[in-house]
Image (tube, helix red, strand yellow):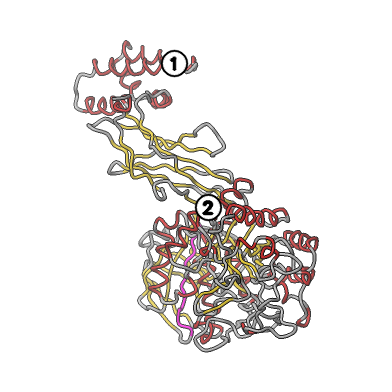
Amino acid sequence: MDEAGKQRVVIEGVEPEIDCGRFPVKRTVGEPVVVEADAFTDGHDALTCRLLWRAESQAEWRETAMEALPNDRWRAELTPTAQGRWLYTVTGWVDPFKTWRRDLKKRVDAGQDVAIDLRVGAALVRAASERAAEGRKQGDARVLAGLAEDLENGLDPEERLQLALDEELGQLMDIYADRSTATVYPRELGVVVDRERARFSAWYEMFPRSCGPEGKHGTFRDCEARLPYVAEMGFDVLYLPPIHPIGTTFRKGKNNAVAAEPGDVGSPWAIGGEEGGHKSILPELGTLEDFRRFVARAAGYGIEIALDVAFQTSPDHPYVKEHPEWFRKRPDGTIQYAENPPKKYQDIYPFDFENEDWRGLWQELKSVFDFWIDQGVKIFRVDNPHTKPFAFWEWAIAEIKREHPDVLFLSEAFTRPKIMYRLAKLGFTQSYNYFPWRNLRWELEEYFTELTRTKVRELFRPNLWPNTPDILTEPFQTGGRPVFVQRLILAATLGASYGIYGPAYELMEHLPREAGSEEYLHSEKYQIRDWDLDRPDSLRELIALINRIRRQNPALQSDRSLRFHKADNEQILCYSKTAQDDVILVAVNLDAHQPQAAWLELDLEALGLAPDEPFEVHDLLTGARYPWHGSRNFVRLDPNQVPAHVFRVRRHGHSERDFEDFT
């Protein structure tokens, strides 16, 4: 037997907690963590529970009182104030003073004699005075000693009762409570706290080599000239596919041809040549100094540069000669190229993470991140992380974020759900996901409920991409402009973070390489494209409008408040997001070909509205305003005009925030 036998409080069911505390939850600076726990004891004694939390670098715990909920559930919240790793846990103890005061009220209400009870309370207060003295809080000790004397020997019984229930006495007794038998939850749980861009971001992907004039190979100076265009559309992250030298051995030709023709530029993901590897730049793009200048110029527009990190090589990469042990050999002595049978990628060699020098490989790959961080890059899109060992990512990301807590990692893992979620647990900040293939209403509602209303939301931040250089889904191939508008609005309002691959998106590139394929015809992965950015049918103005709406409405800057509302037409998807007094309600026509109408059945409580309260909805896409009343309201959406409403909800009698009307 030991002193733990005196700990009568049971603490369990702590949330959020990922895999018994094995992995941390995710937040951004200033984003609260609401912590709940079950806490109870034998008998009927009152409890006190505290949330303990601190930055991992700090020694002292901060404390927040936990609120008692029904059924022995307790709740409090912490708000991290800086990037890095934070810790939290829960403690609780049987509180004799709270028990005494609760029972005293009952006895007084029943008209019982409480003279002895007041002496019991005085003894409790006197003991607290002694604890204050032991803690060298002599002023509080004297105050408590005086209160104990008044409580026990005061002349006026009514005054003694008032003193027993005095708020100041309760606060002092809280501070100097007897915690000698307190229970502390046995696990310290983690929170990884990132900067705001981890939660709210708008990404634009472009190929630098396609930024040159009249189809010539682009340079970083040409990319600088493209920055105003990207900034005007309102993107804050500009993502570049690999910018490294490209191998010539087994180089792919246009449209993924097995053999390249003279002048073919190859795939940027076939990394490495005579000029260098993952820490080198394709000479046609410019120099390292040019790249650093480009990063600085982008920052002047409020844009961060995100780089693609693809841990694979071309047959010409320096690693192949310098570290042949890092690659798997076939029986004929050649190196095993990448495969996804029946597909073959002879221009790419995967690493063998099970080689004898795996530690050296790990260190070298981490140094790739270190190198580009030194050049000013703080965001990385990681290619196919699910094809590399989980243990490597857990180690590498932890090491990098220990030194650079502001670095963010986007996981390009279009894979099975459990693998996507595991990568998020291991440290990836955001992730690609199944959004491109969720088109029906029930699919969207089911998937986004999973992402925002279950434990998944504590660890997985979706970044919604309607298209990528690898993905041109069937609706885009056949649905025309309405699909591009519809999917843009869905991505930008369902998700606080989203991205598009452009200029293919705003110019509505839709032709597949062949029937049944999601590969683009004339894919930019294998050739330079000359884009007409000033085409009159471009979506650039609509994209700029939507990104302005996102920036001006805090409700769209987080995913946790997403709620779906009922509509009596399966072609109409309706949902809302809220942030204090900012309420956004979206209705989207999922039919790209026909107008659709529906009666909406709104969850007024989720919108912060009373059942009989009139309110106004202001369409931020068109500027139109409509008076609505109650939960049942009508919408009609024509895909050939604007296939969605993005409403700001305004209660009558409340002044609306200033907002420019865009039409």
What is the span of residues highlighted in magenta in the rendered image? 581-592
Front residue (pair 585, 219): 219
Residue designated by label 2? 394
Mark yes or no: residue 603 visible: yes
* Residue occupying the far front of the picture: 332
Task: Report whether 68 appears left or right of 139.
Answer: left
Left or right? Give the position of 152 relative to 34. Answer: left
Up the image or down, 516 lies above or below 79; here it is below
x, y percentage for residue 565?
A: 39, 68
Question: Is 591 contained in the magenta span?
Answer: yes
Label 1 vs label 2: CA separation?
A: 53 Å
Identity of the residue drawn at 65% across and 70% down: 314
**Which residue is at a point 68% across and 77% down the rendered structure image?**
266
User: Who's the residue at 59% across and 61% down the image?
Assistant: 201
Query: Is the magenta region chiefly helix, strand or loop?
Result: strand
Q: Nearer the viewer, mark 1 or mark 2?
A: 2
- In which image quadrant can residue 552 be found? bottom right
Residue 384 percent across, percent down from the top left: 55, 66
- For marks 1 and 2 on the same chain, the one whose residue lies earlier in the sequence: 1
Residue indicated by mark 1 = 143
Counting from the top left corner in percent of width and height, residue 355 is at 56, 58
Question: Which sits in the foreground, 629 or 400?
Answer: 400
Amino acid at the residue labelled 1: Val
Q: Is residue 534 visible?
A: no
Label annotation for residue 362:
none
Which element type, helix, strand or loop, lies under badge 1?
helix
Q: Quadrant of the C terminus?
A: bottom right
Q: In the rendered image, which quarter is residue 6 located in? A: top left
Q: What residue sits 51% from the left and 44% below the top?
A: 79
